């Protein structure tokens, strides 16, 4: 029997330093108008952090499933998918897994999806299901038939969010044309100038630093944040190595001697 790894079905706790209001609004619109959303971009573009923040704010129960390479095995995938939804809807998937039995192949995918959709229909409570790092199973034989079958059949109160480093290999453009699928790509994920300035301001850094960093990083979330943190560390190191008087007052002090008397004069 497949053993469920709890860490894989637990929503991350780390949140972005500053909320991405622009992207949160985009996801909110997708949540209301579509039944699924794809967020794709290379590593470090902020996919997981954005989805985590949105999951916390969306007002729905959340089922989170972070995939790894072993999840390319269909029984492993189905067991963890059911377990993730069960964290929001107790007992979800028990009937499906019992009906399917231990041996599940790609030919069983249509039936498995029908069973899962039937269980999703058992509750009308709004639900957000997040598949994180889905690109790790793109080569799995069952991946295309599973999601091509599942997404169009989702109940209105269930929204699925797919996170990956590229678009899934399944033909989804028909769903986009019917406005049932929304796509957020790497270009949209990139920080704008206003967002970069807010991020650097949260570290107490001036806007000039943000402007230069945005050009250097092209708005890539992880790189931009790392640059802001390294700038803070560099500034703190500079202050720590400054003369003691300069650290206390922020001004340099000159000791002048004239006529045998000592006096102090501060200079900016």
Image (cartoon, helix red, strand yellow):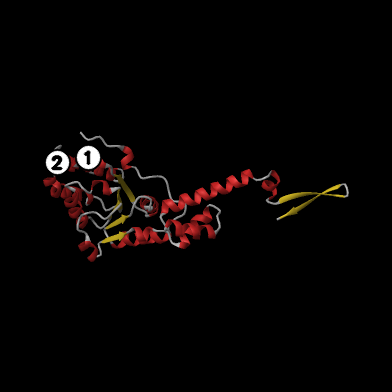
Image x and y of residue 17, in percent: 47, 51
Q: CA distance from mark 1 to mark 2?
A: 10 Å
Q: Nearer the viewer, residue 266 or 102?
A: 266
Identify the residue at image location x=68%, y=45%. Answer: 243
Total numbered labels: 2
Q: Is residue 136 left or right of residue 98?
A: right
Res 151 → quadrant: bottom left
Q: Is residue 164 left or right of residue 268?
A: left
Q: Tell me the residue that label 2 is attached to.
A: 104
Marked residue nearer the N-terminal end (1 or 2): 1
Q: Is residue 76 left or right of residue 111?
A: right
Element type at marker 1?
helix
Identify the residue at image location x=41%, y=55%. Answer: 220
Image x and y of residue 39, in percent: 32, 55
Element type at marker 2?
loop
Q: Nearer the viewer, residue 144 or 99?
A: 144
- Classify 10 Å Cα crowding around label 2: few (below 14), some (14-19), many (20 and above): some
Identify the residue at image location x=18%, y=55%. Answer: 148
Q: Quadrant of the N terminus?
A: top left
Query: Mark number for residue 76?
Result: 1
Q: Is residue 73 visible?
A: yes
């Amino acid at each position: 029997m497949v053993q469920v790894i709890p860490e894989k079905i637990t929503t991350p706790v780390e949140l972005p330093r500053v909320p991405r209001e622009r992207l949160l609004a985009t996801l909110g619109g997708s949540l209301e108008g579509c039944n699924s959303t794809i967020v794709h971009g290379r590593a470090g573009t902020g996919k997981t952090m954005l989805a985590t923040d949105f999951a916390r704010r969306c007002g729905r129960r959340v089922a989170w499933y972070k995939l790894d390479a072993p999840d390319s095995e269909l029984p492993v995938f189905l067991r963890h998918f059911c377990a993730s939804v069960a964290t929001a809807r107790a007992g979800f998937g028990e009937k499906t897994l019992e009906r399917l039995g231990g041996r599940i192949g790609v030919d069983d995918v249509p039936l498995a999806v029908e069973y899962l959709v039937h269980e999703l229909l058992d509750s009308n409570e709004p639900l957000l299901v997040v598949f994180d790092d889905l690109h790790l199973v793109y080569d799995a034989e069952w991946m295309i038939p599973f999601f091509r079958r599942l997404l169009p059949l989702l109940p209105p109160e269930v929204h699925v969010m797919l996170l990956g480093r590229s678009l899934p290999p399944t033909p989804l453009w028909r769903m986009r044309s019917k406005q049932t699928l929304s796509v957020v790509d790497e270009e949209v994920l990139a920080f704008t100038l206003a967002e970069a300035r807010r991020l650097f301001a949260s570290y107490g850094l001036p806007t000039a630093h943000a402007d230069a960093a945005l050009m250097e990083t092209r708005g890539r979330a992880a790189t931009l944040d790392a640059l802001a943190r390294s700038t803070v560390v560099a500034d703190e190191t500079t202050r720590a190595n400054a003369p003691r008087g300069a650290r206390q007052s922020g001004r340099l002090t000159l000791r002048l001697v004239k006529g045998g008397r000592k006096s102090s004069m501060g200079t900016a």
